[in-house]
Amino acid sequence: VYKRRAVDRGPETARQMRLGWLRDFAALPPDRDHPVVAFTGKHHQAAQVIGYNKVAFIFHMLRRDVGNAAFGAALRRFWRDKRFKVAGWRDIEAVFADQAGRDLSWFFEQWLRRPGAPRIELAGVDVEPGTGGVTGGGTGDWRVSVRLKQTGPYYRIKIPIVIDTQSGPTRVTTEMAGADHTAVLQTGTRPLRVSVDPEFDLFRALLPGESPPILRDVTLASTAFTAIVTPDPGVRRLGETLAARMLDTKPRILPPGELPPDDLPGLIIGLEKDVDQTLKGLGLAPPLSLPRALEGGSARAWAGRRANGTPVIIVSATDETALEAVLRPLPHYGRRSFVVFDGRRAIRKGVWPPGETPLSRSLDSR
């Protein structure tokens, strides 16, 4: 369950993996979310987001909570005692609680039996310099108060905080269980920046700026409409097939000439000239209009959002053959923001750069 191989490749690889899981969850519509205990198998993309990604994240948080030694011992004991037997979450909870030497029912209750995720915000930061700071030397005890808010329903969560200082980072973990919490920390030198959960160690709702558009913003949406903007019958048949393979629910294909409503997720498919004309008519700004990263190749797909935040996917191909070539590979790139194909081969793919996270704040001007 726990993605050990990514951890073995280094902390940045593991961080990107966790961020990918959170992006997937951010793309999951609330009406398709469900508790982990309701997961029975991977029948569609939404089930993978909960039954695979969220579960892996739960084990990551459990490891941080009980420590490496207890975590490893609990897994070995669970395997020894339960192999070739039927076991469930209650058995996992019991062995981890026993190995950690404390009650963990609160942890398993909130993460397994509730849908959703906590949403935290950095409400403010107050800095009080110590004697060294007042005299201008930059050293001494600096007091940093980090004010956090959580949107209900509230979770009991352990939140990592990193304070970058003149002499290096200070890392702490603070526990929050209600709507408001203030963590008071001290540093020996001037604090420069405060970052809340910068390594994405907490399963949480991503905030604006942390989650750039990805293809799954549309493919997971049960309310998405598909517009095939090339009138050619062959292209339209291919577009309908592609929509059925990309979308996680039955596609809703619009009649020729109609476009997705402004307030609902949309998938726009067609040949280059028709897609370009459609985008110009919609007045869509980058990255919804063709970004430079997608130039070249025979077909390309990219995700963006309209001015009101509504997600859109654009699929553009040079000709009918190029569109047919991506019918099989394209649906496997839901976690990407864009992908460029040369025939069936993906020659470029990636995620749009994130914006500024609201959970990080510079203190350098204080």
Image (spheres, rainbow, N blue to C red):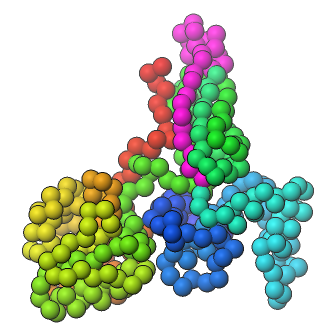
> Which segment did they paint magenta?
118-142
Spot occupied by residue 234 in the image (x, y as percentages of width and height): 16, 93
Quarter of the figure with residue 334: bottom left
Tell me: residue 164, above or below residue 264: above
Left or right placement of residue 152 versus residue 233 in this view: right
Residue 23 in view (yes/no): yes
The residue nearer to you, when weighing 14 against 366, is 366
Taking the spot 52% from the left edge, 72% from the top edge, the residue there is: 32
Left or right placement of residue 52 versus residue 245 in this view: right
Spot occupied by residue 58 in the image (x, y as percentages of width and height): 67, 63
Taking the spot 22% from the left edge, 66% from the top edge, the residue there is: 294
Quarter of the figure with residue 259: bottom left
Tell me: residue 271, above or below residue 18: below
The residue nearer to you, when weighing 148 against 158, is 148
Tell me: residue 234, above or below residue 226: below
Taking the spot 66% from the left edge, 71% from the top edge, the residue there is: 36
Taking the spot 88% from the left edge, 55% from the top edge, the residue there is: 102
